[in-house]
Amino acid sequence: MSTVKITDGLLKDEVLVLGLAATNAKGGIAIESGDLAIDTKAILASLVDMGATGAADEVIKTPGTAVRMFVFTGLGKKSNSYSHETLRRAAGAASRALAGTSAATFALPSSTVENLSAVAEGAALGAYVFNQFRGSSLSEHKPGLNTIAIYSKSASRADAKAAIARAKIVADYTFLVRDLINTPPSHLTPDSFCKKLTASIKSLGGSQAGLKFRIWDEKELKAQGFGGIIGVGQGSANPPRLLHISYTPKGTPKKRFAFVGKGITFDTGGLALKPAKGMEAMKSDMSGAAAVCAATLAIAALKLDVAIETWAPLAENMPSDSATRPSDIITILGGKTIEVLNPDAEGRLVLADGLVKAQESKNKLDGIIDVATLTGAQVVALGTRTGAVMGNNEEFSSTFIRAAAISGEQFWPMPLPVELRASLDSPVADMANIGDKSGGMLVAGLFLKEFVAPDMPWLHLDIAGPAFNTASAHGYTPVGGTGIALRSLVTLVEGA
């Protein structure tokens, strides 16, 4: 993980990152250097000759004059006030391009603390690499940018230093999410997921940081009636788990939320076996669990005054002689029976157990948020970069969407049409686990709604598309696990 700091000192033998913006449709460009004053005339002429445009994700390296190397990162159309996400992505693109470089100073427009935070966050997020499983080829792959310095005249201010520290924490725990997602299922089982998270809790300080955890094994889950988790995980040699993490701040918390994350450490589809093509990406089916657990740790590290109860139902969905069969009936915690028409619609089954358990909290909750790579229909509806938001409380939904916009993560509100509910009726059980294919993402949301009390504010985040990037890297987003939802959850809690 990179070191992130703020500076206003002299620059000598530095790698210097500057912004580049398009000034007009005829190819005009301008250098944006924030608080750093530099002579741009000679450099601009060279950039024009090189065909620079200032477009987003464009990164150009040139030899420096007073510094060792200039790195120009595209900001898009020139503006007097760049959005935080524009700065975040530009810094991330430059940071990705600097893999193998020991240190770089970022001088981008940062006239406000929010801008400063966005630059630091983007630069830190862009420095991610995942080389844990490289052996003989490790030397051929560059490590991430090691030291990130953000140039600002506000370097001595307490709020600026706090913004840099926050960016570092957010990036570190986003890396934890990405690492968990990218880890192959041979190394990440329900049990090892729990061990990795509990190790992170202990390294943060455990109870001294306000954190506690508990793990239910397969025997306890079966004895206590967690039929969804057991039903999904019973076909695997790697038994299921339920991980509970709680964070309690010092003093009286302002609010108390519960997070529930889908934790399918690998999803073959069970006896509804998925096609081989693309199945390798199903190691990402625990992205929701990773996001909510790491977000809880980030909230604890930031010492926010909101209590969090986090539940991660974990299972591996495998085909075997003990796997749940189409037409089997399982009983969710609390007694509702489900006819499993499709064993590949398994995420909603483990989440149902988690949602019911979360509402057994001894403390009054101000809301529940579940996060899941739940449906392929989400990708059809919103593509691979935008998550869906569904729920039963418009105010809670609006508050979350505002928080997501501040964080830079893309989420979009979706309805839960009551007329689709009837498609989940079963002739032999309380419900079936699938309904109409049309509006499949919404039907899945309606299924989950059945396990939430009507007066409990609840949000369901479907991140099936944006959780795992199978295309090319862009901005601060790498190929593989992205870590989406963590930053939105942290921002939501900060604003509570």
Image (cartoon, grey):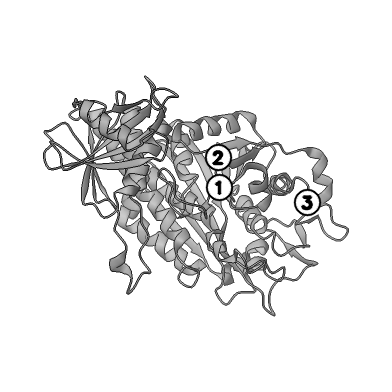
Residue 91 image point, x, y percent: 34, 39
- How much space separates mark 1 and mark 3, taking CA atoms? 34 Å
> Would residue 302 be visible to someone looking at this image?
no
Residue occupying image coordinates x 63% and y 72%: 318
Q: What amino acid does circle 3 point to?
A: Lys
Residue 361 image label: 1
Residue 215 image point, x, y percent: 49, 63
Task: Please indicate whether residue 136 sits to the left or right of residue 105 in the image.
Answer: right
Judge whether 136 appears above or below 82 on screen.
below
- How much space separates mark 1 and mark 2, taking CA atoms? 8 Å
Task: Please indicate whether residue 160 sits to the left or right of residue 458 in the image.
Answer: left
| Label 1 close to label 2 by CB (< 8 Å) | yes
User: On the image, numbered disc 3 is attached to which residue?
Assistant: 437
Q: In terms of image quadrants, where is residue 429?
A: bottom right
User: On the image, numbered disc 2 is attached to which residue?
Assistant: 365
Residue occupying image coordinates x 64% and y 30%: 394
Helix or strand or loop: what does disc 3 sit on?
loop
Task: Please indicate whether residue 146 sits to the left or right of residue 237 in the image.
Answer: left
Q: What amino acid does circle 2 point to?
A: Leu
Q: Residue furthest bottom?
A: 321
Task: Name the foreground residue: 389 vs 9.
Answer: 9
Q: What amino acid does circle 1 point to?
A: Ser
**First in sequence: mark 1 or mark 3?**
1
Q: Residue furthest front?
A: 49
| Label 3 close to label 2 by CB (< 8 Å) | no
Q: Residues within 10 Å of mark 2 (few under 14, many from 20)?
A: some
Judge whether 114 appears above or below 384 on screen.
above
Residue 83 image point, x, y percent: 42, 27
Front of the two marks 1 and 3: 3
